[in-house]
Image (cartoon, rainbow, N blue to C red):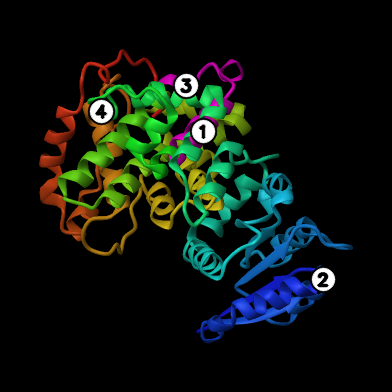
Amino acid sequence: MKKRIVFVDDERHVLDALRRMLRPMRDHWEMTFLQTGEQALDVLEKQPQDVIVADMRMPGMDGVTLLNAVRERFPGVIRIVLSGHSDTNMALQSVRHAHQYLLKPCGAEELKATVDRTVNLKDVFLNEAVKTVVAKIDTLPSLPRTYLELMAELRREEPSLRVVGDLVNQDVGMSANILKLVNSAFFGLRTHVSSPIHAVTLLGTEIIKALIISLHLFSRFDMERFPGFSLELLWKHSLTTGLFAKTIALAEGRPGSEVDDCYISGLLHDVGKLLLATNFEAKYQEVLRRSRAEGRTVHDMEKEIFQATHAEIGAYLLGLWGLPENVVAAIFFHHAPPHDPPPGFSTLMAVHAANSLEHDLVVFNAEYAPHPMDMEYLARIGLADRVEAWKTTCAEKLTEEYRLERKDPLR
């Protein structure tokens, strides 16, 4: 069945260009091109649509107002912002109204990939409990400017690693943290990394992008407002989970791009905790208090108190920011894998196993609730017999640097 997609832009030449560019998609998409938000709402009222793609700056009903109306009246429609470069900040400040955003000019392949990705992530974006929690967050954090500028450079036909390194270097705090991290045992590099350009060359742009996102989110967290939250220990847990996911991928002989995705997913798998703790301080303190008192996992207690978990909230944010579908799915399901998974290796499997192994191998309080692997899930995908080998290999990665004194890593 064809996907129904509505495009809204007040500039006719933009619509004409989209119509020409997307003509090859006519066998896959049923497309409607409109110039006003009112027209779009009328179309949605008359016939169900799968996706709406709207410009931000339009006379009368602007993009934010339109997408907010769609969110309230037609919640099952995927909402995508199509923004000019000058509108980027406005788009990012309005992300609660959209599931994804694109920058003009946008090519056909990028637009197609974005639509396909958002439709495939409907379980994330249209989860009612997640939408309820996100709707109560005043402002979702925006992507760091360094990331946006880096993405703009990488979209060039011949991106320059030197330019990418210079962009990272412009943010002194980000640059210092990346260099400190890259030179730590978590990456196991045999050479000292002295510049962002060197770091980009050794690690690749995908891992650098993930580090920028992660460091940005962690740096936003106000520890003084939340004394019960151990940011350093959560950071160490995230780094080690990324290391273990990468280690598992390498043990299974996966290609480099998949190894990177596993590391990125492990690094970012708990960012939803930062969102929940920052925006719902009192309720999250209750999550932590009851988790400790009742010997239950934070994940289970979040589900009881919020009806949504950090895994789902984190996946929503990172899906909104356009991270790869397999990375978002790995974060969404890392505690509770799906019941009907495809057989064999996946990024999701590596992160689920890595998170469990980190809790098993780095024990800081024996009284805390365990995080066992879902062995039935691993049996269904045909990898249950690999667990002991993964555990042995990951244990070998635990140097003294990782065996830190831990009081409460909020896990």
Dots 1, 3 in contact, CB < 8 A: no
280 sits to left or right of 204: right
Q: Amino acid at mark 3?
A: Ala
* Viewer-proximal residue among 226 and 17: 17
Task: State the mark number for residue 36.
Answer: 2
Q: Residue furthest bottom?
A: 27
Which residue extends farthest right?
Answer: 60
Around disc 3, counting alpha carbons within 10 Å, would you say few (fewer than 14), some (14 to 19), or many (20 or more)?
A: some
Which numbered mark, 4 or 2, is in the foreground of this view? 4
Which quadrant holds residue 362? top left
Name the amino acid, label 1.
Asp
Q: Amino acid at mark 4?
A: Leu
Q: Which residue is mark 1?
A: 166
Which quadrant: the C terminus? top left
The residue tagged with tag 2: helix, strand or loop?
loop
State how far apart marks 1 and 3 are (Cα): 13 Å
Is 225 in front, or is 186? 186
Residues tagged 4 and 3 counted as in contact (Cβ below 8 A): no
Q: Which mark is residue 29?
A: none
**Residue 364 occupies quadrant:** top left
Residue nearer the viewer, 345 or 172: 172
The residue singled out by tag 3 in the image is: 176
Q: Residue at x 22, y 16 (%)?
A: 400
Q: In the visual, does 349 lie left or right of 107?
A: left
- The mark lying in front, picked from 1 and 2, is 1
Circle 2 residues within 10 Å: few <14, some 14–19, many ≥20: many
Mark 4 to mark 2 CA distance (whole Å): 54 Å
- First in residue order: circle 1 vs circle 3: 1
Residue 15, above or below 254: below
Residue designated by label 4: 189
**Residue 218 colored magenta?**
yes
Q: Secondary structure at mark 3?
A: helix
